[in-house]
Image: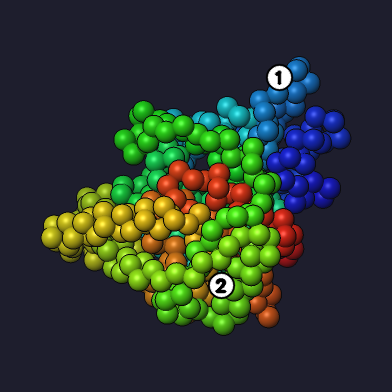
């Protein structure tokens, strides 16, 4: 694997088809990398090694026999342990589901499997996906590969670690208040949250029926676009899925940002960030301006109003999903998740109605914003990765979701990608947001930035 370590989807595909690489050797190398790092980073709840080896041999036989499933053929992938994979336990990072074997594939994994992807295992997450530190009381804390004393972000922390360390080029995550973009930001990779309804949630254990999204983490924007091309599209068995055409996300991805109108918020809410983060994001905006974009300073006071309403919807949905467990076995939850569920259960119907009304109003505000602008630029997280020891999970959730949660509330597509490092070497994340169903435009902007900066770097432990 040493030669393939850090390769993306396109490089692996070229190697397979030129017969300079086999799927089996790449998967074996990936498994060796995971075994080497797991005692330190704890990115995986389960490594499905024998299944991965068998699938890799089958992918090699297919290529040898003339069957090519496309760009994802033989690509190793890590799957957040919320997605059902038939025959494999889905724990949701909880004590309740340690032995819960899935009897069917989630729709996202079905599409990836049919496209030829090979699953390496199920990744660690914050319990029930309800938090951002990934300090899991049942399966142990996942650790940031850039500094093992720090959190990787969550709840898709294990997926971000797997990608950042080169264990695989892509991983699946979910995002309800920032759970793809926060770990992408803190671990220095790309994390894409599509428009809600763009990717099926069937077979994914929910946190919030109202706000959940699924999407990829990757080391490059092009790889994220390729995965989205595979998993996007209508699923008539998912009530949240929306029947809209799927764009070709790669056809114009290299076209740059010349003429693009990029909104840069000016309110104090957006500048209350660590100075190193602020400098990196400001320089990112100037870089895109040099690439030909037009920067438009803009006041967006409505975004600052979203946080409390977002918390109401997540908490009440989660409390409803866990109603029986909370009533009968509350001690089975970790302390921080239990407290958040109990808060959610205490919400009134009036609270929820007001939050839903606010969501309608904020979506209208977002429509106005993206009627006049192409992309919104802001930090992904206001700080780099905080220390794990002594971390307050509830305070961390409030702080780290400041800039991500608004775009779950408004259902907009958003992407986080690396835009520099602190003086101590920790990654800093940039966030770009676009209008609903405009993922192609969002990816084009992100790719222009990535091309100009060199993109994500491997965390080498």
**Residue drawn where x is 45% and y is 59% of the image:** 178
**Residue drawn where x is 64% and y is 37% of the image:** 251
Which of the numbered marks, if any, corresponds to residue 385?
2
Does residue 221 show up?
A: yes
Disc 2 packing (10 Å; few <14; some 14–19; many ≥20): many
Disc 1 packing (10 Å; few <14; some 14–19; many ≥20): few
Helix, strand or loop at disc 2?
Answer: loop
Q: For marks 1 and 2, give the CA distance.
A: 44 Å
Name of the residue lying farthest toward the bottom: 275
For the C terminus, which image quadrant? bottom right
Q: Is residue 305 above or below residue 455?
A: below
Does residue 61 show up?
A: no
Where is residue 78? Give x, y as percent. Answer: 59, 46
Q: Is residue 263 left or right of residue 24?
A: left
Q: Is residue 239 left or right of residue 153?
A: left
Where is residue 32? Give x, y as percent. Answer: 73, 49
Where is residue 67? Give x, y as percent. Answer: 71, 19
Residue highlighted by disc 1: 67
């Amino acid at each position: 694997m040493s030669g393939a370590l850090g390769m993306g989807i396109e490089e692996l595909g070229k190697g397979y088809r030129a017969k300079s690489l086999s799927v089996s050797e790449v998967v074996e190398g990936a498994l060796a990398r995971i075994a080497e790092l797991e005692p330190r980073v704890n990115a995986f709840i389960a490594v499905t090694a024998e299944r991965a080896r068998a699938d890799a041999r089958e992918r090699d036989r297919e290529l040898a026999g003339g069957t090519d499933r496309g760009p994802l053929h033989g690509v190793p992938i890590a799957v957040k342990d919320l997605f059902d994979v038939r025959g494999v336990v889905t724990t949701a990072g909880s004590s309740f589901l340690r032995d819960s074997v899935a009897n069917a594939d989630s729709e996202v994994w079905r599409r990836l499997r049919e496209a030829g992807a090979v699953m390496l295992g199920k990744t660690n997450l914050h319990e029930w996906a309800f938090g951002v530190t990934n300090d899991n009381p049942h399966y142990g804390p996942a650790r940031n590969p850039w500094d093992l004393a720090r959190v990787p972000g969550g709840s898709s922390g294990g997926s971000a670690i797997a990608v950042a360390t080169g264990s695989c080029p892509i991983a699946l995550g979910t995002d309800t208040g920032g759970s793809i973009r926060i770990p992408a930001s803190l671990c220095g990779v790309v994390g894409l949250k599509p428009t809600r309804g763009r990717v099926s949630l069937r077979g994914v254990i929910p946190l919030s029926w109202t706000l959940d999204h699924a999407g990829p983490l990757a080391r490059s924007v092009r790889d994220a676009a390729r995965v989205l091309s595979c998993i996007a599209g209508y699923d008539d068995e998912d009530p949240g899925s929306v029947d809209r055409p799927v764009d070709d996300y790669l056809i114009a991805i290299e076209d740059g940002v010349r003429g693009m109108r990029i909104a840069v918020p000016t309110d104090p809410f957006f500048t209350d960030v660590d100075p190193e983060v602020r400098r990196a994001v400001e320089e990112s905006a100037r870089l895109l301006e040099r690439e030909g974009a037009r920067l438009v300073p803009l006041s967006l006071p409505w975004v600052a109003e979203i946080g409390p309403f977002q918390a109401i919807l997540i908490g009440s949905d989660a409390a409803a999903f866990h109603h029986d467990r909370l009533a009968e076995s509350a001690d089975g939850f970790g302390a921080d998740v239990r407290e958040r569920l109990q808060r959610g259960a205490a919400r009134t119907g009036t609270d929820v109605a007001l939050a839903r009304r606010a969501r309608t109003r904020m979506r209208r505000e977002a429509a106005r914003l993206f009627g006049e602008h192409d992309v919104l630029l802001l930090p992904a997280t206001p700080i780099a990765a905080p220390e794990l020891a002594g971390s307050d999970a509830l305070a961390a959730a409030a702080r780290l979701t400041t800039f991500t949660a608004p775009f779950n509330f408004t259902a907009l597509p958003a992407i986080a990608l690396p835009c520099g490092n602190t003086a101590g070497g920790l990654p800093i994340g940039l966030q770009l947001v676009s209008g609903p169903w405009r993922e192609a435009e969002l990816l084009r902007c992100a790719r222009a930035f990535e091309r100009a900066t060199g993109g994500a770097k491997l965390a080498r432990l």
